[in-house]
Image (cartoon, grey):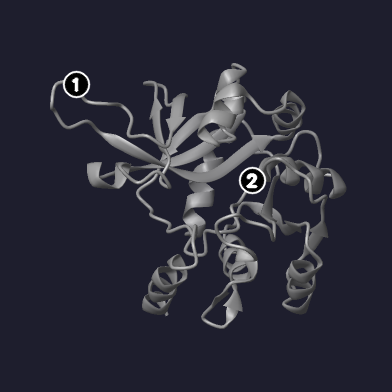
């Protein structure tokens, strides 16, 4: 088995979100949402370093007051992954390292999910990984929950906001919901950004489709862990209950 590379965790956190303005600063049990994500990521033993990447001074100031490492990035990035690359370059992440894109709106993230995400990098042919979990058909109807289909070797075939695969014979299919965590070898992360937005990425509003449209394989890791993302203000109540239950 090959030696694992170094892993760097970067949490992109932008202020302007169409559905939830100022989302990273939303208070959950007395602390901003980004703090909960950072504290959970810190418990992943494989990560050498974790940093918040933001385009907003309010978020940066709040991070500094809570001793969360932060780096300022441009405010015109098309996607969170573009922001992650800028942060990685500012941190001088080595070319042979792996960068983990940790979504800033996953305050119930289990650190074990990050360990699962990066384990496949024992194999040199793995360049990008992401997570998915088995879901109920009713969950698949939610366009906020992205669905994924993958090959026998777990290479992603497609991601969609629509339920996939569609059943034409009335039988129940195994359905998988995508969890928006990614790990990239630094070389592929640079390539991702230079490619620019792809046709299907624009249609579905899913940045990961940029890789598939350009023939870059993404390895899907199946997890039994569940993480509740925050898409809208009303989701704060749900994640607060989950975190209170843990405490």
Is disc 1 placed on a helix, strand or loop? loop
Query: For the point 54% across and 28% down, which residue is it?
Result: 218
Up-down relation of residue 2 to residue 239 (above or below): above
User: In the rendered image, is residue 40 in sight?
Assistant: yes
Q: Which mark is residue 69?
A: none
Of all residues shown, which one is farthest toward the bottom?
30
Query: Residue sitting at 81 percent across and 44 percent down?
Result: 86
Residue farthest left in this picture = 170
Quarter occupied by residue 148: top left
Q: Judge whether residue 123 can be spotted in this image.
A: no
Q: Which residue is mark 1?
A: 168
Task: Locate residue 112 relative to residue 99 in the image: left or right.
Answer: left
Number of numbered discs overlaid on the protein picture = 2
Q: Residue furthest top?
A: 215
Residue 100 — which label? Answer: 2
Find residue 71 and report its horizontal and vertical position in percent.
81, 58
Residue sitting nearer the eye, 46 or 153: 153
The residue at 61%/40% (across/down) is 183
Horizontally, residue 217 falls left or right of residue 76, namely: left
Is there a contact, CB below 8 Å, between mark 1 and mark 2? no
First in sequence: mark 1 or mark 2? 2
Residue at mark 1 to residue at mark 2: CA–CA distance: 37 Å
Task: Specify whether 92 is left or right of 16.
Answer: right
Which is closer to the viewer, label 1 or label 2?
1
The residue under the point 39% across, 45% down is 223
Res. 24 image quadrant: bottom right
**Which secondary structure lies at badge 2?**
strand
Q: Quadrant of the C terminus?
A: bottom left
């Amino acid at each position: 088995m090959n030696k694992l590379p170094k892993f760097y965790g970067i949490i992109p956190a932008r202020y302007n979100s169409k559905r939830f303005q100022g989302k990273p600063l939303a208070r959950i049990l007395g602390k901003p949402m980004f703090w909960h994500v950072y504290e959970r990521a810190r418990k992943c033993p494989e990560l050498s370093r974790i940093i918040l990447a933001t385009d907003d001074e309010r978020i940066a100031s709040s991070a500094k007051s809570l001793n969360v490492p932060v780096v300022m990035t441009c405010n015109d990035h098309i996607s969170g992954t573009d922001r992650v690359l800028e942060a990685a370059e500012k941190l001088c992440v080595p070319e042979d390292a792996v960068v983990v894109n940790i979504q800033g709106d996953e305050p119930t993230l289990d650190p074990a999910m990050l360990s699962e995400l990066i384990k496949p990098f024992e194999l040199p042919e793995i360049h990008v990984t992401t997570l998915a979990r088995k879901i109920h058909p009713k969950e698949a109807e939610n366009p906020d929950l992205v669905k994924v289909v993958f090959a026998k070797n777990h290479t992603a075939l497609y991601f969609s906001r629509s339920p996939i695969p569609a059943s034409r014979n009335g039988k129940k299919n195994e359905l998988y919901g995508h969890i928006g965590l990614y790990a990239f070898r630094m070389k592929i992360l640079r390539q991702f950004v230079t490619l620019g937005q792809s046709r299907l990425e624009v249609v579905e509003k899913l940045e990961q489709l940029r890789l598939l449209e350009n023939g870059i394989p993404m390895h899907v890791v199946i997890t039994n862990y569940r993480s509740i993302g925050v898409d809208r203000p009303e989701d704060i109540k749900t994640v607060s209950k989950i975190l209170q239950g843990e405490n």
